[in-house]
Image (cartoon, rainbow, N blue to C red):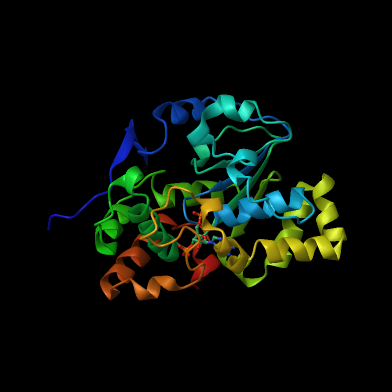
Amino acid sequence: MNRKKPSYYNHNGFLMPMGFPVEGFTSALNYQAQSSDIFLVTYPKCGTTWTQYILWLMQHQGNPLSPSEKLETYIPHLEEVGKENIENLPKPRVIKTHLPYDLTSYHPQAKYIYVARNPFDCVVSFYHHTRGFIKHYDFSEGTFDDFFECFIRGEVDFGDYFDNLVAWYEHKDDENILFLTYEAMKNNIKMIIIKIANFLRGDYLNCIENEKILNNIIINSSIENMKKDQQRWSSKRPKNMPSFVRKGEVGDWKNYFSSEQQQRLTDKFMMRTAGTDLKHLWFF
Ligand code: A3P
C-alpha cells in the first residue's frame, strides 16, 4: 500500500521538522552544558510543554505568563534556536531538548529532567502534531495508520521513540537526572512538583514551602488553563487542526489503534525494552 509520509530534514539519518532552521541542529550538537544548566528532556509529545510551563511557574512564584510573553523565550528549544541563542540566556539556563542521550551535552553538575510517556498515547499525540503543523511536515492529509507505520519504524523526527527512552532510562538513577512520567504527572501533579523542587533545590524550594505558590502552579499549569490560550504554546497551528494542547488524557490511544497495531507496538515495546524494567512503568 502506498502510504503518505511526513516530510523531514535528514541530518545524516536523524530526522528533524522542516520548519526548524537546518543550522540549529548542527549548532545544538556543539552546545557545551554548563554546571548551572537545567535540561528539560523529552521525546516529542510526552509532556514537554506542560513541564516547561511548570518550571517557568516555579521560577515565577506561580504567576502566569503575561499575554505578551512567550514560554520559549525563557526556556528555548535547543535544536530549534541553536547554541548561540542558548548561550545568550542568563544563567542558570533552563533548556528544552528532544535529543537522545548520546547527543545531549553532559556536565556532571548540570541537571536533567526527563519526562517519558507511554508510546501508545505518544504516537497518537505525535500524529495530531504532525498533521497539524502543515508547513513543518506537509502531512495534513496523512492518516493515523500512515503515521503509525513511520513511528513503529522509528522514521519520525527526533528519531526512534525507543532509542530515546531506553538510553535515558538507563541513567534514571544518576544523581543529576530526574526521571518522570506523564502518567505520574496526571496522577498526582502536586507530588511531581515537590519532586522537581527537591531535585532542583535553591529557589525552587520556595514553591513547596508556600502552599499558595504551590496551588497557583498547579492551577495555572492545569490543562483547563493551558487550553484557554493556545496561541501562547503554538502560534503556528492552523485553526482547522486539533489544538496544540489537545486532550491531555491517558489512554486516548484506544480510540485510534486497531488490535493488530496494538499487538505490533506491544511486541516492539517488549523487544526494545527487554532486559529493563520499563514495562512496569506502564503496563504490568
Ligand atoms: P495529547 O495530544 O495526547 O492531548 P508536548 O508538549 O511534549 O508536545 O506534549 C503534548 C501533549 O501534552 C499533548 O497530549 C497535550 O495535550 C498534553 N498537554 C499539554 N499541556 C497539558 C497539561 N497542562 N496537562 C496535561 N496534558 C497536557
Residue at 59% from the left image edge and 57% from the top image edge: 50
The x and y percentages for residue 220 are 68, 62
The x and y percentages for residue 16 are 38, 39
In screen coordinates, is 283 left or right of 128? Answer: right
Q: Nearer the viewer, residue 81 or 11?
A: 81
Q: Nearer the viewer, residue 220 or 32?
A: 220
> Total number of numbered labels?
0
The single residue placed furthest to the left in the displayed view is: 1
Q: Is residue 172 visible?
A: no
The x and y percentages for residue 186 are 60, 69
In screen coordinates, is 111 left or right of 154? Answer: right
Residue at 47% from the left image edge and 64% from the top image edge: 246
Q: Is residue 71 visible?
A: yes
Q: Nearer the viewer, residue 69 or 126?
A: 69
Res 209 quadrant in image: bottom right
Q: Nearer the viewer, residue 221 or 16?
A: 221
Residue at 38% from the left image edge and 44% from the top image edge: 157
238 versus 76 height, above or below = below
The x and y percentages for residue 167 are 50, 46
Quarter the N terminus occupies = bottom left
